Image (spheres, rainbow, N blue to C red):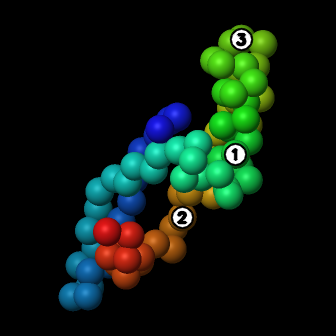
């Protein structure tokens, strides 16, 4: 895993109770090879190896674009169950 993003997450149970918590999503160079935003982050680290002051703005943009893809507000309980 190259990096991970943890963010607040909630969902409604079948009985209508809202469950609050956090969700963590990892960026895996192999698993996320088909994700264009994830692939861009992986490519950056493949080419540069680390974040330097010269590239910090570029990395921030790449990570923001990736996070916008993985932080979904429409995740349902069925999605969670299917992912297990």
Residue 52 to residue 21: above or below: above
Give how far across and how far down residue 45 sits, in percent. 67, 27
Residue 73 lies, in percent from the top left, at 51, 67
- Closer to us: mark 1 or mark 2? 1
Q: Are the residues flagged by discs 2 and 3 in contact, CB closer than 8 Å? A: no
Quarter of the image where the C terminus is located:
bottom left
Residue at left offset 38%, top offset 70%: 83
Q: Compared to 69, does 16 lie above or below?
A: below
Q: Against 82, is 36 above or below?
A: above
Q: Residue at x 73, y 35 (%)?
A: 43
Spatial CA distance of label 2 from label 3 is: 30 Å
- Gap in angstroms between the C-alphas marked 1 and 2: 18 Å
- Which is more foreground, mark 1 or mark 3? 1
In the displayed orientation, state which residue is furthest to the bottom.
15
Kindly tell me whether residue 66 is visible in this rendering.
no
Q: Which mark is residue 39?
A: 1
The residue at the point 72 percent across, 19 percent down is: 48
Question: On the picture, is 69 further left or further right than 8?
Answer: right
Which of the two residues, 51 or 6, is positioned nearer the viewer here? 51
Label 1: which secondary element: helix
Residue 34 spot, x, y in % from top left: 68, 58
Q: Residues within 10 Å of mark 1 (few under 14, many from 20)?
A: many
- SS at mark 3 in the image: loop
* Residue denoted by label 2: 72
Task: Return the disc, 2 or 3, that comes first in the chain's sequence.
Answer: 3
Q: CA distance from mark 1 to mark 3?
A: 21 Å
Query: Label 3 belongs to which residue?
Result: 53
Of residues 5 and 36, which is closer to you in this image? 36
Question: How busy is the neighbourhood of tag 3: few (under 14 within 10 Å), some, or many (20 plus)?
Answer: few
Q: Earlier in the sequence, mark 1 or mark 2?
A: 1
Left or right: 72 in relation to 18: right
């Amino acid at each position: 895993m190259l990096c991970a993003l943890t963010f607040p997450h909630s969902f409604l149970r079948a009985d209508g109770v809202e469950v609050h918590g956090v969700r963590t999503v990892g960026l895996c160079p192999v698993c996320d090879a088909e994700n264009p935003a994830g692939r861009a982050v992986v490519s950056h680290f493949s080419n540069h190896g680390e974040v330097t002051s010269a590239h910090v703005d570029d990395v921030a943009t790449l990570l923001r674009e990736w996070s916008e893809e993985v932080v979904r507000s429409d995740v349902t309980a069925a999605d969670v169950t299917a992912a297990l």
